[in-house]
C-alpha cells in the first residue's frame, strides 16, 4: 500500500562530496527510509554551483528547488530540517545558528564547527526548542556519536581511543607493510586523493584533534574545544621507528585519546605504540576505528570508513531520519547535549606516560647513563640493526626529552629516534 503520509521536508545547504552523497542516498533509498521510519523529501538545495546541484537532481529525478541562496532555504516555512554541509566555521556557524533560531532541526557533518562552537550552538538549540545532530562529524560512517550519547549513556568512560584520520592510517599502513618512508607513503596518499596538496591538517593531527574534542565533550560532560587538545602528528615517524616497533611485536598508529582520571581530563592526539594484539593495531589503510572502554560495557570497538561521499552521507541520513522521527512524534530535542561539568583539562606536559625510543650506544654504558639521568628504564633491548630499544616507565615526556638531549650533548648516547608513547590498555 502506498504511504500517503506527508513527508518531512529537508533543505540541504552544500551539494559537494558529502552533500551529494546525502542527496543520493535520500533519493535512491527513499522507499526503504519511508518503510522503516517516515517519508523524507529533499525540498530545497542551496549551493553556489547551481548547475551542479541541478544536474544531480535531474539525474536522480528529484523535483527539488535549487538556488544559491541558503537564507531562502531556511526561511521556507515548508522546510523542517536544515542540513549544513558547506564546511568551515564562518558561514557554517551563521547558517546553523540562523536555522536553529528559526526553530528548524539542523543536521551537520561539520567537525570544525562543532569542535569550536558546539557549546554555543547546542545552547541556541535548547533555547529555541529544537535540536542539532552531528553524527557525521566524527569518523564518517561509524555511528560513534549515537553510541556515546544514547547507547552507552549508563557508563562512566575509562578511556576513548580512536584512529580518526584515514590519511594518516593509510600512510602508516604503507610504511609498515611495504617498508616505505614517510615522504613516499604521503605521495601515494596524495595521488590516491586521500591527502590534500597541503597535508598539514591530516599528518600533523589537527583533523583528528577536532574529532577527539567532540568525543571528549560528549563522554565527560565538559565542553572541550579543539584548541584544548594536545596534538602531535606523524611527520617525524621514520621507517626505522616502524621497523623497530615491528621487532617488538607492535604497530604505530596515530591515536586520538580522551581519558578521565582523578577528576582531570586529557584529550590528545599522538603517534602510539600498540601491541599487535590490540584491536586498533589491525585497522589498515584508510579505515577508521573507535575503541571505547566503559565501566559497565567494558571494551568495544567500532570500525568502518571514516570519510567519503556515501559513508559520511549515510551518517548524515541517519541524523535526518532521527530528527524526522522526533518531529513526527513531537519530541524534538529529546537527546540534548549538556556540558555542565567543570573539569581541568591537562596538557601533555602534566600527564605521566610510558614511551618508546630508539637509541644508539653501547648497552651497558647507556643503561647506566639513562638511570643516572633520572629516566625510568622499564626495558632496554638490543635491536637487530645494533640500536637499543628503550621502553620507559611512567614519566612526563618533556622530562624524558630533556634528559635524552642532555645525554646526547654529553656523548653518553650517540643519538635517539622519535619519542613514541606506549598505549597501554587500562584494566
Image: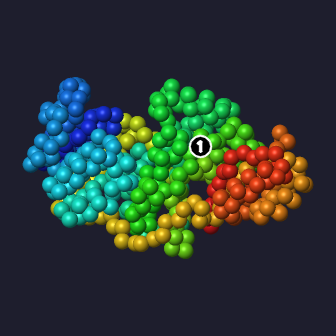
Q: How far across and how far down the image is residue 361, in percent? A: 85, 47
Measured as percent of width and height from the top left, residue 74 is found at 15, 46
Q: Quadrant of residue 216?
A: bottom left
Q: Is residue 342 left or right of residue 332?
A: right
Front-most of 228 and 299?
228
Residue 38 in view in this figure:
no
Mark 1 residue crowding within 10 angstroms, few (<14) / some (14–19) / many (20+): many
Residue found at x 65% / y 54%: 421
Residue 88 appearing in the image:
yes
- Name the element at disc 1: loop
Q: How many marks?
A: 1
Q: How is the image coloured?
A: rainbow
Q: Residue at x 82, y 62 (%)?
A: 371
Q: Which residue is mark 1?
A: 234
Give me the residue at 33% from left, 38% from top: 18
Seen at 69% across and 61% down, the residue is 399
Position of the N terminus, as image quadrant, is top left
Answer with left or right where residue 298 lies relative to residue 411: left
254 left or right of 78 in image: right
Quarter where residue 14 is shown:
top left
Quadrant location, the C terminus: bottom right
Residue placed most toward the observer, 340 or 145: 340
Give the farthest residue toward the bottom. 262
Q: Residue furthest front?
A: 409
Instruction: Depth check: give the residue in front, 373 or 127.
Output: 373
Q: Is residue 210 above or below residue 335?
A: above
Percent across and percent down for residue 225 are 41, 58
* Residue 373 placement (x, y as % from top left): 79, 61
> In the shown orientation, is residue 345 left or right of residue 28?
right
Quarter of the image holding residue 88?
top left
Amino acid at each position: 500500500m502506498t504511504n500517503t503520509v506527508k513527508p518531512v521536508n529537508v533543505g540541504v545547504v552544500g551539494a559537494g562530496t558529502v552533500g551529494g552523497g546525502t542527496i543520493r542516498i535520500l533519493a535512491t533509498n527513499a522507499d526503504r527510509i519511508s518503510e522503516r521510519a517516515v517519508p523524507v523529501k529533499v525540498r530545497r538545495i542551496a549551493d553556489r554551483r547551481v548547475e551542479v546541484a541541478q544536474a544531480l537532481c535531474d539525474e536522480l529525478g528529484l523535483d527539488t528547488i535549487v538556488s544559491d541562496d541558503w537564507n531562502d532555504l531556511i526561511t521556507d516555512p515548508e522546510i523542517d530540517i536544515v542540513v549544513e554541509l558547506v564546511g568551515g566555521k564562518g558561514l557554517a556557524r551563521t547558517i546553523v545558528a540562523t536555522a536553529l533560531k528559526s526553530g528548524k532541526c539542523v543536521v551537520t557533518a561539520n567537525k570544525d564547527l562543532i569542535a569550536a562552537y558546539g557549546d554555543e550552538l547546542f545552547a541556541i538549540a535548547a533555547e529555541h526548542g529544537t535540536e542539532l545532530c552531528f553524527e557525521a562529524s566524527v569518523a564518517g560512517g561509524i555511528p560513534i556519536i549515537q553510541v556515546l550519547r544514547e547507547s552507552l549513556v549508563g557508563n562512566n568512560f575509562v578511556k576513548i581511543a580512536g584512529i580518526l584520520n584515514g590519511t594518516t592510517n593509510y600512510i602508516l599502513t604503507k610504511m609498515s607493510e611495504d617498508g616505505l618512508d614517510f615522504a613516499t607513503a604521503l605521495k601515494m596518499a596524495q595521488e590516491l586523493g586521500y591527502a590534500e596538496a597541503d597535508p598539514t591538517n591530516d599528518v600533523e593531527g589537527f583533523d583528528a584533534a577536532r574529532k577527539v574534542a567532540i568525543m571528549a565533550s560528549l563522554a565527560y560532560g565538559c565542553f572541550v574545544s579543539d584548541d584544548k587538545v594536545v596534538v602531535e602528528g606523524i611527520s617525524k615517524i621514520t621507517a626505522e621507528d616502524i621497523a623497530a616497533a615491528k621487532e617488538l611485536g607492535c604497530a604505530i598508529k596515530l591515536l586520538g585519546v580522551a581519558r578521565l582520571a582523578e577528576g582531570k581530563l586529557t584529550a590528545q592526539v599522538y603517534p602510539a605504540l600498540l601491541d599487535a594484539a590490540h584491536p586498533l593495531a589491525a585497522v589498515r589503510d584508510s579505515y577508521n576505528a573507535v575503541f571505547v572502554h566503559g565501566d559497565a560495557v567494558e571494551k568495544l570497538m567500532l570500525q568502518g570508513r571514516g570519510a567519503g561521499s556515501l559513508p559520511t552521507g549515510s551518517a548524515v541520513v541517519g541524523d535526518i531520519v532521527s530528527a524526522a522521527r522526533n518531529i513526527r512524534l513531537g519530541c524534538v530535542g529529546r537527546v540534548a547535549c549538556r556540558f555542565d561539568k567543570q573539569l581541568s583539562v591537562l596538557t601533555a606536559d602534566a600527564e605521566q606516560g610510558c614511551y618508546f625510543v630508539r637509541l644508539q650506544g653501547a648497552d651497558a654504558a647507556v643503561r647506566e647513563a639513562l638511570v643516572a639521568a633520572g629516566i625510568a628504564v622499564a626495558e632496554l633491548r638490543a635491536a637487530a640493526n645494533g640500536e637499543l630499544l628503550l621502553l620507559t616507565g611512567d614519566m612526563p615526556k618533556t622530562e624524558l626529552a630533556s634528559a635524552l638531549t642532555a645525554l646526547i650533548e654529553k656523548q653518553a648516547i650517540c643519538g635517539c629516534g622519535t619519542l613514541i608513547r606506549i598505549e597501554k590498555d587500562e584494566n
